Image: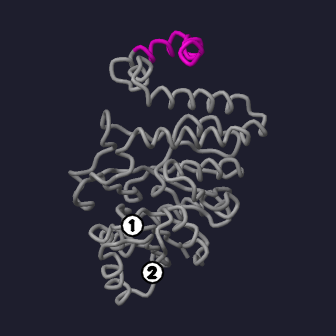
Amino acid sequence: MISVVVPCYNYGHLIADTIRSVQQQTYTDWEMIIVDDGSTDNTAEIVHEFINQDKRIQFYQQQNAGPSAARNFALKQAKGEYIQFLDADDCIEKGKFEIQLSVFQNNPEADIVYGSVRYFKKNPADKSEWHFTHWGADKEWMPGISGKGEKILPAALKGSFAHISTLLFKRAIVDKAGTWDTAKRAAEDYLFLLHCVLENGCFVYHNMPGSYALVRWHGANTSNNTTWIHEGERQMRIELMPVLEKTGNKEAVEINANAIKALDYMNRKTWRKKMLSGGPFDSVKKVLRYIGLEKIAKRIFYK
């Protein structure tokens, strides 16, 4: 069984698409656990209409405590051998469960299987709406990291490497990673993935049409507030530093330290922010990388 964990806050107008995308899965042995995090809209009414027709859906309500608390509550109810975290405004393609479970069967060492993401604004079924991103160039941003534990830790620390809805987890690695940090309202999903890496989790990236996560891009996306996101990630990385130092992985520690500085610069009005934002400076970075001066430039840049 796959347990689908859905935290929800005032997304009654969107959650029907999310539920239908799970109901349309070609693999049918799943349960859906929706936790309403103190919504003040019609979320409960919408969800109960589905529950009346499909007993695989469960619904719980709690006082507003954030999405991490909602996920932790749902995990306590979950009975599945696999866990799918799914935001209440997002969807998944109908073959996601079947395709990713087959990857698990072919890769018994895998703890987490994931693929790519497509962003849409209104209709998840309309592929003409799909984009790789809704920021910068419309191209794949996920690096497609595969591997295990410390071997992929440096790469994983270079930046959030997957959207949470793209991943399918074995329950065992979720339990090892521990509870979601309820004090975090930004970058909490990235922190959870890093905990999976630190627990020696084995990630397998399998990019196949039919298994995409479909992420809705709208005005209420928390990721629209980049200053808040950057500061949340910066604080998360600062708190994570002692854990990284204990691993003895010097490359991981250096990457994390540089990221902390970069995130700080990104929230300031400085030339460094312009450099980090990309655009015309991307070609400069590529040249430095090509001629082997990138590391020297980073030491100067982050001094």
Q: Main secondary structure of the magenta part?
A: helix
Local secondary structure at mark 1: loop
Q: Which residues are magenta?
A: 284-303
Magenta run includes residue 290: yes
Magenta run includes residue 113: no
Q: Amino acid at mark 1?
A: Tyr
Q: Residue furthest bottom?
A: 52
Residue 198 vertical placement versus 254 (above, below): below
Local secondary structure at mark 2: strand
Q: Which residue is mark 1?
A: 9
Residue at (23, 60) in percent of width and height:
123
Residue 155 vertical placement versus 25 (above, below): above
Q: Which residue is mark 2?
A: 59
Q: Nearer the viewer, residue 105 or 181?
A: 181
x, y percent for residue 249: 74, 33
Residue 53 vertical placement versus 228 (above, below): below
What is the crowding at mark 1: few (fewer than 14 residues within 10 Å), some, or many (at least 20)? many
| Real-space CA distance between mark 2 and mark 1, rounded to the nearest whole angstrom | 13 Å
Which quarter of the image is occupied by the C terminus?
Answer: top right
x, y percent for residue 268: 43, 26
Residue at (48, 55) in percent of width and height:
164
Which quarter of the image is occupied by the N terminus?
Answer: bottom right
Q: Nearer the viewer, residue 71 or 171?
A: 71
x, y percent for residue 3: 53, 73
- Residue 247 quadrant: top right
Mark nearer the viewer, 2 or 1: 1
Lateral position of residue 77 relative to residue 17, left or right: right
- Disc ID at residue 41: none
Lateral position of residue 150 relative to residue 124, left or right: right
> If you read the primary sequence from the N terminus, does the residue marked by circle 2 or circle 1 appear first?
1
Q: Amino acid at mark 2?
A: Phe
